[in-house]
Each structure stands twice: as structure tokens, then as C-alpha cells.
Amino acid sequence: MDELRLLQELNVRKLQMQTRRHFLQKCSTGLGALALGSFIGCSDSGKPLQGINPLSTKLPPAFAKAKRVIYLHMAGAPSQLELFDYKPELAKLDGQECPGSLLEGRRFAFIQGVPKMLGPQYSFKPYGQSGTYVSELLPHFSKNVDDACVIKSMFTHEFNHAPAQLFMHTGHGRLGRPSMGSWITYGLGTENQDLPGFIVLVSGGKTPDAGKSVWGSGFLPSVYQGVQCRSEGEPVLYLNDPKGMDRNLKGKLIEAINTINEEALDTYGDPETLTRIEQYELAFRMQVSVPEAMDITKEPASMHALYGTSPGESTFANNALLARRLAERGVRFIQLFHWGWDAHGAGREEALNMGFKDRCKEVDQSMSALLTDLKQRGMLDETLVVWGGEFGRTPMRENRDGKVMTWIGRDHHTECFSIWAAGGGIKGGIAYGETDELGYYGIKDKVHINDLHATLLHCMGIDHEKLTHSFQGRPFRLTDTGGKIIPGILA
Amino acid sequence: MFEKLLSFIGHAHPALVHIPIGSLILTFILYRINGRGNRRNMRHAINVGFFISTIAAVVAIICGLLLARQGGYDDGTLGWHKYLGILVAFLSLTLWYTHQDIYKRDHSLTSSMFNSLFNLCMIALVVGGHLGGTLTHGKGYLFKTESSQVNATNTKPALARLTSATDQKVFAEIIQPLLNDKCTSCHNPDKKKGDLILVDFPGLLAGGKHGPIVEFGHPDSSALYINIMKPLDDDTHMPPDGKRQLNETEKKLLAWWIKNYKSVEDQVNDYPSFEGQLLSSADDQSIHAFEFDVSGIDPANEKAVGQLQNKGFKIYGLAQNNPMLDVAYSFKKDLDKKSINLLQKINQQIYTLDFSNSNLDDALFETMDPMPHLVSLNLNNTKITDKSLAYLKRFPNLKKLNLYQTTITDASIPILEGLHNLKSVYVWQTGISASGLTQIKTAKPDLEIVSGIRTDTLVKLKLPKPSIRTDTDLFYDNIKVEFASFFKDAQLRYTLDGSIPSPESDLYLEPLVIRQPVDIKLIAYKEGWESSDTASRSIAKAGFKVKEITLEKDPPKRYQAEGPETLIDLNRGTQPGDGKWLAYQKDDFVARLTLEQAQTISRIKIGTLQSAGQWAFYPREVEIQTSTDGKTFNRIKRRNYPQPKKDDPGGLRIVEIDFTPVQTSFIKVILKNLGKNPVWHKEKGKPSWVFCDEISVE
Amino acid sequence: MKWYCPSFLLCAFLSCTATDKTHQNLPDLVSYNEHIRPIINNRCISCHGGVRKKAGLSFLFPEDPFTALEDGKPAIIRGQADSSKIMQRILHHDPEERMPQKAEALSGYEIALIKKWVDQGANWETHWAFLPVNNPTIPSSPSSPHPIDRFIRAELNLRSLQANPQAEKSDLIRRLYLDLVGLPPSLETVDSFENDLIHYEQLVDRLLAAPGYGEKWTGMWLDLARYADTRGYEKDAHRDMWKYRDWVIRAFNQDMPFDQFTIKQLAGDLIDNPSTADLIATAFHRNTMNNDEGGTDNEEFRVAAVIDRVNTSYEVWQGLTMGCVQCHSHPYDPIKHEEYYQSFAILNNTADADRDDQAPTLIVYQPLDESRADSIIQFISGLNPGKNKSRIKQLESDLNELPSASLPILTELPAKQKRVTRVFERGNFMLPGEVVRPTLPAILNNQIKPDSVSRLAFAQWLVSPSNPLTARVTVNRFWAQLFDKGLVATLEDFGSQGNRPSHPALLDHLSWKFSNDFQWSVKSLIKYIVTSETYRQSSNASDVQLKKDPSNSWLSRAPRSRLSAEAIRDQALAVSGLLSDKMYGPSVMPYQPDGIWKTVYSNLQWVTDKGEDGHRRALYTYIRRTSPYPSFITFDSPSREYCVSRRITTNTPLQALVTLNDPVYVEAARHLATFMENEPGTLEVKISRGYKRALIRDIAPKTLQTLTELYHEAARQPASEFSPLMVIANALFNLDQFITKS
């Protein structure tokens, strides 16, 4: 079936190619039919139809509130108890031994024996009309609470970083599954044919624990994997012309290549050849469009001031500003990673009272700037912004090897953690879900990671149960076998 | 095929069954009229009546059995219906058979028996017929009142019903219909699954075989609610998997009712308002519903779409099975009248229109046609002025208008006020004044006006430190120096005498050529920015030229760099593996240098590094030997260094060895390897490395 | 009246949909596999299968549908469709009751099929792949002598398709070289082949004997073995695995019979007095990932590793998706939940335990030092420890001087330390269920379930005549390498959800020959295939062929497929004369852009190799799981986290950027340019030679013209290190025909 469609389409595109004089005229896939989605639906037969540009835009099954996602992942898992989940009760118990009931049959990464409870390390105040509680560590963000929805009852099953990050981004705790961004570009294609549909920006000096797999395409075709744009060197690997290759000569080169490839197309009638011709044109355009999009020197001083960038370095602030530039240009899924939140208290950088504060400084101004900026440009209502880590931190103080540690820290915790979401399709100014007074268990409206995914996909107009891909004999989906949309946080 | 025929016949039962009923009743009437009378033709008619009834009854029964075979009926009722049916047929047969005899003399006994048989037959007929009705139309069909009829067929979603009025009865008009929708198909007097009947309030109160199912005030301890909330795969979940489920709203409604229940007569306004109304519910189809009815709108003309795309427009459908389009022409500068005219071909379908950062201006905008369904228009950073806003009337449905970075002024305010459907307008970085803003706000209180941040209040940032680049770090006679800033348009001002530059200092225009050692200081300036920190770099002349340099032992392949010469190329390395380092594991580093001619030397600089992670440590000892003949060397200096500490950050370091001047041209430099990773090291005891990238003799 | 209209309509609808097909082509004998299984798999099994058994009904195991359900009656009564519940439900008038529920009704034809099948006694048939391999009769076809061609042509005739004529010699020799050794032929060879100085068969033999042969096919095997040089997960630290890679290369080059190949990798340590090589082979299952992240539960990740071993073993040798069964009984194939853990038990007693030191390991030496090390060891063992203490000490220190590596291998736990295996509920190792014994899935071995099966026995069983799958799956893999698509398209799944073979008889024919006539010799198998006309035909596609067989399932033409990531690089290096033919040894680090490796808590560094090692075959490139060699990933090579049977070929702009701008290809272009420069003659001649060197075929006039114009364009530019001829070379490396095998 697909194959016959392929044939029709092949001819249309052949025609198109012959009718235009020079390839630079054509700026998009330029196929009316494709735009109207008559060829590709959201859940088409797994393998990309040979010869059809797999990234050409596909229609969401339903009207989508959000056109794109900006996902801010705080790798290492920030402590909810120091940022969003205000626990006065816990403060009272500070320093007392943890009740055994909380420890029975549980596994922790480092905590051993009976740890002491650890009260919130920073003071909280309600902000905005919604009166959402935010800690003193996020002075800027506290101004944006009425645009954001804080979910306090997230929970996960993985208590080590790599698996937990995989779980957060691929819906499964082991390697090999496609990431959120891959699923979404697989489902919706990309809006801007001159840029990759799924772009990843990393700050904090390290890639996340789980490595590039958190933006990998798993068993989906590699064309859907995240393209890491780097702030040092070429923004995209091999993007720059080699030394001595002049730009317009490159144009001629590509023209020559495609002329010869068109001969091949006539001889062998292979649809792949046609796609290849288109991909070379796109590559040529990308060489201009990507550096343009990634160049923050184009931004006025005021924008740098708003985000608090440090030009020339790869900081979270710079990436936040870049995220907005990419969103403006129609990139479908923009993934930011900021490393260094693993506040065990094992060292200065890992201490709640030291490194953790610095991390907050690094992200607070810029993430709030991102929301403000998207809003004032009229983009927030169609851009879904999510912020969070891969799990939570224990209400107990970490006691590595059963000893009291120099620095204050908390161990990994799966039972509950806080994230926030804002913009496209999300109801602002609410706190969703509740945890017990110790901040140990979620007690109301618990949100499973699959549920979060289901809801994100829903905001993008996709039914999470319909977006599937068959691999090793069974249909897989981002929400694996679970996932329920959370009506409570939808606008 | 035969199977289908059978089921076909089966389905005829409800039709055929009316024949025997009719004819039997007719026969009964005739028989009564005839009474003891003995009119021949009457007797004939009655006889025929019995005959027809019997045949028809038998046929109807056969069909009935076939129909029953397909199942789906309540066995109890079915059983009775079946046997009564058969009884009727049997009786009518007997009646037909015995009919003749009753007219014979002295058969009063027979005739009275005949009468009672006939009455029995009629009773069986009525009861059986009624049961048949029950099977097909459900219990109590016969006695249903108008109102309950309405409820039973009322298919409006529960929520819709709720919102209609506030004085309506909660149970009768919201809950009972909900139960009828989702529960009564099994919980009716007929099927009574779990001995529970939900067709009316008493039934609900009575509960089922596990006792009462509602505890008013406490949904969470009411079986009715609990079972509904159980996970679908739970066996006791209601309604069972496969049956139509309650959606989120309906569940919330039920809880809301149980919680607030006072009496069966409660009205909506007796209760706290139902917050479920605010929630859109996930499994409600309505959540995917589009904001207006698009059924009347045809799909867009594909040709026009294709043409527009080749002109650089991005055009996407909004959703599958939805003709509306999302049209964008942004970050492009060759918009022309032709394209604008093309838009006319799809003006019915355009839902969002984005011209942001394009060359759209008043002239082009003027030629734009009305778009009845346009909801969102983005004019961000276009050349349009107040003039254009007048044309906005062509878009009656406009809800979102983005004007940021345009030159529109307060003059546009009246027009904005005139757009009735407008919900939000974006006027950041426009000519709209503060007073103008307040004016709109007062005129249209519920219009969202986004005016963004005031950029002038923001704290200026410091410019990044500019960089100073040279091909080599040391030089013999001259060296080229380049400056660079992250911002190409930043002004770079510098001094060479070590004094701090000022806005008046020399402006960098082209690379400098340095012939004497200098102490460079450099600062970057840029509009809107704090000036950068001072970049400084002192560039020194290199030591004596080295004729030849050799190593006692080849380093491992990975750390051979460009051979021994790397050590005198005047270039420092930055990190291991950058191809500028020579290194040994376990072994010491031993290099022999031969100067171009004998010199008096008093100092040797050695570039080395430490990086615990890579097992690389500064030498534990540095020894300098010289020789007069290049064969026998004798030590002139040795320096020891302490064991590296755990918290020592390490990094690049230049080791300077000073000694009493000596005249020679043959020098041997020995860096003693630490040998093993120190005790505090993660991999302690493993063979460590010693690194060297540059040696300079002075 | 209103209520029964629908049922009349439904009735009418059913009867007419039925009439259209039913009467004509209802088969006389309804076959379960052919007619019924597809219906069940598409319409019923998701609710009535291994995962969900609605109303207690399942269609998985032959006995299932005939045993009484919750309500006491079976779904199917043999021979009595009318009284079988299944018919009642699929015909039910009430849509709520009708099966399949909440889905459209079965078509009249499907219903008729099921009815007839039940009436004919509802004979159950085992899934084709589980039936023993038989030796099918070869279709008699006058035209073609080669059996393969007869099988293929038979199908073509049915579809009135014509096989293509033999490909042009240039295309053919390039195809053969790329397929057998993964490299293009040299110009000399091409000439001698085009001038009939050497025959096709001779070429084949030559290539099968070439060392490159082993390297090429090892590439395929390493995807299955999920081979990598690091451990995966957070730290993703280094691990010495290269010795195993070398073992595989040697095995292929020595044409080790596939059954031996199998046994050594799965249980080399358990065969009688195993050689070092046999131990090295067992590293196959040490390619599983380790998590050295702080605070991880070693047992959790040891279990994850064993699970991966079970899944991999079954995917590689049986083409079965055991992955499903670790959580619940197989949704589609007749394998029970506990049977998964019975296989798990077989592999659950190896000594390794996700330890940071990778133990148990084997000390191995670099190729050059190997002989020396061996002789020393020999010598020491010869010496008398009492007398020559000091001598021995000396020798031993010499031995330690040699750069060595420690290769993780499999060893079995001693009997007293054996682990007890329990079923994990829903696959969660925190929820152990009841104990299971190590044994084989019932469906796959016709004899009675042995009580206890060792790892060795497991391996031997895989390659025993009684195993229906191994030969089929393996033959299919090699076929897929040569024809771009397997006879069974889903290489990884021969289960009932996988595709049915396009040529069942041919598949069995090959499997039979492979395991009997060829005695598991891979080289013989490959030779047998590539000598067929089907393999040799041209790949041009006529409109008719495109219309009748767009995806070329019937092979009326040779496939056209993009080269693998490895082949593309090797080819560029080869035609530019840069490629090093050095074999074996530790993985190398050719040029890679800076800043690719930035992994947490790890000091692993990419140190670019200078000289020869910068130009080794792609096979030897260092693979780090969390950050594999970028240009390979771009061309769809997997990151080796899990076993991958089938690479999905994509076609992206990033690929264009690699072959256009990656310094590797620029350098290659420079060398190819020099080659052209040194060719005597006019510019046209130079370009034509360069073209032939790269693409093997002769240049077409139009192409030559295009390239010449390009040359002049380039010449007009101010001189730079990118010479005009380099531009031409750069263009050649980006031609569709260069990165595609036709």
C-alpha cells in the first residue's frame, strides 16, 4: 500500500525537480500534498517510506495546543525539598533519626543504616496570584509562577542516574529506546526544513550520565535522533566547509553532484536517489541556517542582560537564549541539559549549602528569562516548556558508608520529586499533586513518568497510545504499556 | 452460509410471533360469540383459526429457538418465554384437535374442559407474549412513564446536562441518567448482576449482595465509587472491561453527588459548585474538539498550497481531518503581491498567519483579502504601521494579534478597541506608550495585553574578555599578534607597556608585529555592555637556538607528537592528547640538547603538566647535566619536588631551573617520573606518567 | 419494529459480503497456518493471547481454544461450527457482544473460512518456522541450471515478471567485492575481469580466500554480538574486548563451521580442555553492559546482563523475540513465562557479576607479542620450579613487560556456588517467583524436555538437527547481507508476528544444504548464492517492475542498497590509496572532531592515532557506547548496546555533510586528486581515470562534461589548498553511485 503511494509521490516530486531551474529556489519540501498530510499520517508503518523525506511535516491527529517543546533537564536531580516542595513539618524533625518504617525494604544508592532527617535548607514564600511556594534560591523564577504549573507528585522506578535519565527521556530504564524528541519528530516531522527537528544543547561541562542515548533514536531510524549543537567548534559536526572550499564553489559542487545523481535516478529509478538529491540541498541550506540560528552575537545587549549570558562559553544561560532562537525558527523539540545537580554532600560542588546554590544561580535567571521572553514574543502559548530532574532527593541527610559527612546532602529518592511545566496547553499558576508532610511519598494525584509523557504528547496533538513503532515483533511506544493524560494540568 | 440463513430466520421470530397471537385472540373472540350456538360456518371459522394459530405458533417457536441459540438473553426470562410459547402451541393444537367433539351431545364435561384449556391457553399467550416484550425492550417496558422514557434515551453527556440549569434535581436529572447510560444494562431487575438494581433510587439505596453501595458524604468508602475508580484490569472494576466506561467528568460528578448528598430532591444549587466543570477530561472526546465547527469548510486547494510553498511559505494542516491551515512566511524577505494574491485561494482555510521577521509592509498588507476564519496573526518585526491596522477588520475572528517590534503607535488604540473577538495582543517594543496601555486596559479589561519587560532597567553585562593570539608562545626575532573578541563589532583598545587601556588607548585595526618583549593589555568596548576585563599577555624572546634534540628512549606511540623537535617548537600544549606533548609511563624523561654554538647558560625552562585523572604528575625530581664533548655529562643542578597532594589541582606548569652560569653547548635534561600513582589516588600504585612539551635554554 | 431492523441489516450485510468471495475461492481444505493464523493474529490474539486471556480464552497453544472456558464450554468444538461459541460470538447481533469487540466485524470471507475450518475438524498446525527443515524438491525449469534461480524464477513466472539480464561487468565486480570483502576492486582486477582474463568463479574463490573476507563478515557479526570497547551506562569505562573481535575475524577466514562457531562462543569454556582461542570466543556474552555508577546494585545489573544474554542468544540463533517473555508469557508465540526463566537458568551460572574489575578475565597479548608470550610460557612450564627459581622469576617479569590486556570471558560457577533461578514476576528482579530448572522451551525441541540443560548442551542443541530454526535464521542473515533483504524480511523475528518467507521452499533448500551438504561451511553457502544468476542480474528497474514489485520482494532485479557506514569509509580510503591493510590488535582512534567525548566521571580520552592506525578499516575503530564514532552513527551503525539484526538505512542531510566536509573524506579526496594528477593525458582522461578508480564503471559522457565544467569552475577560484581536482574527488565521494551498491 505504502509502496504504491510512494510511486505516485515519486512522480510528483520528479516533476517538481524538473520544473524548477535552480535548487536554491525551493525552500521547503514544497509538496502541497505533503503539507496537507495526505501521504503520511502520525502512526504510519514504522520504517520510513523509502524515498519520502522522513522529516517532512506530518499532521497531528488532533488539534495541538503546543507546536514545539523546550525541555530543560537538570541532570543529577535537584532537590525538590530545597526548591518547590515546602515541608515545615520536616524542619521540625531535622536531626532526628529516620523512622524505620520509611527504611524497610527500600534500596538507596548510598544511605546506610539509620540516617537522620534533614529539614529544608532554605526558606520558602508563596508567590504570584496562585500563591505557589518557591524557595529563596529561585528569586527570578518566583516572578513567573503564575505562568507555570508545578507538579510535586512525580515519581519514578529508577534510583541511579543513568537508568533514571533514560526512564525520564525514553520511558524505559534501560538503553535502546527512542527518546521523547525522537518520538515527537517521528510523529510530527519538523516545522523548519532548513534545520534539524530535534536539537540538543548541553551545559555544565559534561553530557548527562546516560550519555547521548538520552537523545538517541533507539530503534527508530537515526534520522529522528537529536542533533547536538555545540557552542564550541562547529555548531553541528562537519557543518563547516573544509579549508579552501569557497561557499559558492560548494553551491556549484552540490549542483554538479545532483545533476549526476539525477542521471542515476533515470537509469535505476531508485526513490532513494531522489531523496538523496533533496538531502544534499537541505545540507547546503543547513550550512547557512544553523550557524545563523546558533549565533547569539545577533542578539541585542538587552537580551543578553535578560538571560544573563556569558558569550563564548557553553552556559545554561546561553543555551536558554539559543533555545528561544531555535523555537522562533520552528525547531520541533529543543532539549537542554545542565549537569551538576547531584547534591549528595560528598564534596563542595555536591553540597546543598555550596555547589547546589551555584547551580540554582546558573539556571534561575535564564529559565525565568526564557518564560518572560517567549511570552512577550507571543510564543509561550504555543511552546511547551518543561523543567525537572530524573528523580528526587531523600528527606533524610545522606550518611555515606554510615558516617556523618562534612557537607550537607541528600541521597537519590524515587518516591516523589517536583518538576514544572509551562506554556502550550498547560494551565499556569497551579501546584499539582501533594506529598506527605515529610516529603517522602506522593499522597495525592501521583504522576508517573509515563503519564507526563502521555500529557506532553497530548499537548502536541498526539494520542500516546497510537504513536507506536514495531520492533522485535512487538509495537513499542513512548509510554510503554502505561500512561494516562493528566487533565488536572491542562489549560 | 447456512449459518447465516438460520440466524436470518431466527431474527424473523419477533415478527412471525404476532401471527399466532393475533389469530388465537380472534379465534377466542369467535368462540365466545358462538358460545353454545352451533352455526356451521362459525365452527368452520373457529376451526380454521385454530389451524392457522397452531401452524404459525410452531413456526414462530422454531424461529424463536434459532434466535435464542445466538445467546445474549437473560436465561430466566428466556426459559419462561420459551416454555409458555411451546405450551401455547401445544394447547392450540389440542384445542383444534378436540374442537369438533364439544358440539356433540352430552359432552358438557369435554366442553367445560375445553373452555378451561382455552382460557389457560390465552393466559399462557398473554404472559409469554409479555415476557417476549421484556426480552426485547427490557424490564418494565410496558409500564414505563414518559419521563423515564426520556431519561432512558437521553444521550447528552452528563456534564452537558449539568451545565444547562442550576435548579435541576441532581439525582433525577444527572445521576440517574448517568447510571442509565453506564450501569443499568446489567443492574436492572431483569439481569440483577450482583443482586444490584440501579434503575431507581430505592434500588441504589438497597445495595447489592455485598450490602449498601453508597455511604453518603464519603465517596471513598462507597462501593459504587470505589469500584468505578479501581484500575481497569481489576476484576471488580465497574463497569467491567469492555463495557462503556465512565469518563473523568462523570466519575467526578458521582463523587460530587455522594459527597454533598442531602436528599433525593437536592438541586444543583444546593451543592458547592462542581469543580469538574473546570477540568477538561482526558477520555472525553471533547478534549480533542476544535474550537469551531469546520464541517462547512472544504479542504484547501492543493495546487495553491504547492505554489505558495515553492514561494517560501510554510503551510501545514492543523490536524488530521481538519481543513484549517497554519500558514507562515517568516525570516524571509521576498514576499510579493503575487504570493499575497495566492493566499486568496486558501483564505477560507487559513487559521494562523505568521509574517514575523518578513518584509511585509503596509502596501503588501493592504492587498490582503478577508479571512473569515483567521484566529491568530503574527506581524512581529515587520514594516507595517498604524495604517495597516485599519485592515484588521477583514479578520472578524481574530483572537491573537502579535505586533511586537513594529512601529505602531497609540494611534492604533481605537482600532484595537474595535476588534471585538480579540483576546490577546502583543505590543512589546512598539510605539504604544504607557498611557496608551492603560487606555486599552480600561477600555477592554479582559483583553490580555503583553507589553513585555522594560529593557532599559536591565543590568548591563560585562563583555567577554578578548583573546590575544600568536603562532608561538616565544619568539626569536619577531612575532605576529592578533586580537579577537566574541563580538565582531566590539572595539578593542590596547597598550603594550603594561598600563591598563582606556577608551582613548590605541584601537586595534590589524595584526601587530612585535620585535621586542612586550606586556600587552587589552580591553573590549561595546554599546550596551560593560567593558570587558583586561586581557593581558607578556610575550618573551626565546632562549638560545637549539641545533639538535634527541631522546634517550622513544615515548609510546600516542605521545610522540611531532618527535623530539616538538620540545623546541616554541609552542606550549594545552592538554594531553593535543599532539604537543611527549610523555613516558613508569620511565623517566631524558632529553639531550645541542645548542647551535656554545653559550653561557644559567636557566632552563621546562613545560610540564599534572592531571591526576590521567595518571600524569609533575616530575618528582629534575636534573640538569652538561657536557663539553657531548659524551660524558656531569650534573650541575638537581631539584626535588614534594609528593603531589590530593587536592593539588595540577594543570600546566613551567619549571624554571636556575643555576650558576656555565659555558656549554651540550645539555641533558632529566625529569624523574613519580613512578606510581600516589596512595590517595583512585588507582593508586598504577604506573604514572611524566609529561613535557617545551624546553627553553637561557 | 425499530429494534430488529439493525439485525436484519447486519444479517443482510453479512450474507452479501459473504457471497462476493465465499462461493468462488474458499479453499477446499482450510489450512491453519495459511488461512486461519493470520486472522487470529490480526484480530484476536491481542486479547486472547499470552498477555491477556479475556474470558480465559487464548489461541496460543494448540490445546487452548478446545478447553472449557470460564463458563464451562470450549470456544471451539471440532467439526461443529454451529454449536461452537466462536461462531456465535463473531456472528452476534449485539455489537457489544460481537467479536472482535470494539472493532469492525470480521469479513464474511474470514467468517466463512473460520466456519469451514472448524467444520473440517479445526486442525491446528505448528507455526511454519517451528516445523523441521526438509529438503524441498527443486522446481524444474529448463532455462536455469542453478537451483536458486529455479526457485526464484518459479515465483517470477507466477507474477509474470522477467528476471533482469546479467549486470554490466563493472557493476558486477564492484558488487561482488563490496559484498564479499567490503572493499572495491583495484583497477587492474577490473581490467582483467572485463577482458575475461579472470572468470567470475575464480574471482569468487579469490575473494573468499582474502583476509578482507573475514573483516567484512565480522562487521555483520559484531552488530549481533553487540561488540564495543566500553562498558556502557554512566562511566562507560574502557574494556579490552578487541581480542574477541580478532577471534571472529579468524573464525570467518578459516571458515570455521557455523556449529563450531556457535558452540565456542556460547560455551567454549565448557568443552574438553579448551584452547585459549576457545576461551576468547566466550567473550561473545561478555559484551553485555556493566554499570559502574556509584551506588548501583551489582545484582540488578548482573541480572540485566543475563537477561540480555538470553534475549541475544534467542534472537541471533533462533530469530525469536524472547524479550517479550521476560515479563509475561509470549503474546504471540507459544512460549511460556516460566520457560523464559528456564532458559535464563541455563545462562545464570557464569562467574561474572557486574564487578568493576570485570572478573573473570583472561590475560591476552598483542598480535606481535603473542608468539613470544606463548614461547615464554611454554619454556617456564618446561622448567623445574625447584631449581631455576631466579630464571623463572626473570622470565615472568619479562612476560609482565609485554603489553597485555585482560579480556572478560565466561566461566561456570563451581557446583556449590550455583545460583538458584526463580521466575521474576513482571520481569522485575525484586519480585522473585518460584524456582525453575535450566531447560529448553517445549515448542523448540521435539523430544521430551530434558530435566537439566548445561550451557554446553544448550549450544549443542542450537546447532543439532532437531533444531528447526538455527539454519533458517542463519541462512537468512547471509542472504540479507547479499540481497539487502532477507527471504524472511524480519531477520530478528521468525515468530508468528514476523513476516512469512517470500520463498519458503528456497529458504528450506538453503537451510538444508547449509546444515547438511555444506556441513555448516559459511564460505560454501556464500559461494553457492553469489554464483546464482539471480545474484548476478542487473539492478535497473523498469516501470513494469516498479509497478508490479516496488519493493523488489520477488527479485526480478538485483537490489540497490546504500553501503554500510563501515563500507563507505573503507571504500573512500581504499580508492584514495590511504587504507592500511594492518589486521587485528587493540581498537584504534582515527581522526574525530574535538569535544565529542564528555562523559561524567570518566578520564577516558580520545587520542588520535597518527600514521597507519589513522587509516585502518572501520572495523577496528574504537566504539564507545555512550558516544560512538560520529560519522558511523550518522550512517546508521548501531551504538552496540543491544543485539541488532537489521540496520535501518536512513538518508539524511547529516550524511551529506560527512562525505562533503569530514576531514577524513577531504584527506581521501586529496590523495585521489594526486592519483588523478599523476595519470598521464588530458584533463578529461585524468577525470575519467579518477571516476573509474572510485566507481569502477566507465564515465558517461554527460557525467564527464558535468565534472569538467565543475573543474573549470573550481579553477576559476583563487588557488587554495582545495585544488580543482580535489573538488572533483570530493564530488565523486558524494555520488549516489559511490555510496550505493548497484
Image: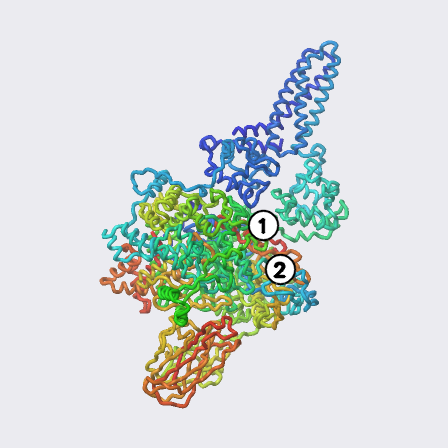
Looking at the image, residue C67 sits to the left or right of residue B184; the answer is left
Relative to the observer, which residue lies in front, B91 or C432? C432
Q: Amino acid at mark 2?
A: Arg
Looking at the image, residue C488 sits to the left or right of residue B383; the answer is left
Which residue corresponds to mark 1? C434
Which residue corresponds to mark 2? A106
The chain under label 2 reads: A
Residue B455 horizontal/vertical position (percent): 56, 70
Q: Are marks 2 and 1 in contact (CB under 8 Å)?
A: no
Residue A44 horizontal/vertical position (percent): 48, 48
SS under mark 1 = strand
Question: Height in image: B584 above or below C324?
Answer: below
- The dot on residue B532 is none
Q: Amino acid at mark 1?
A: Glu
Question: Height in image: A453 above or below A243?
Answer: above
| Quadrant in which residue B560 is drawn | bottom left
Q: Work out whether disc 2 and disc 1 sit on a shared chain.
A: no
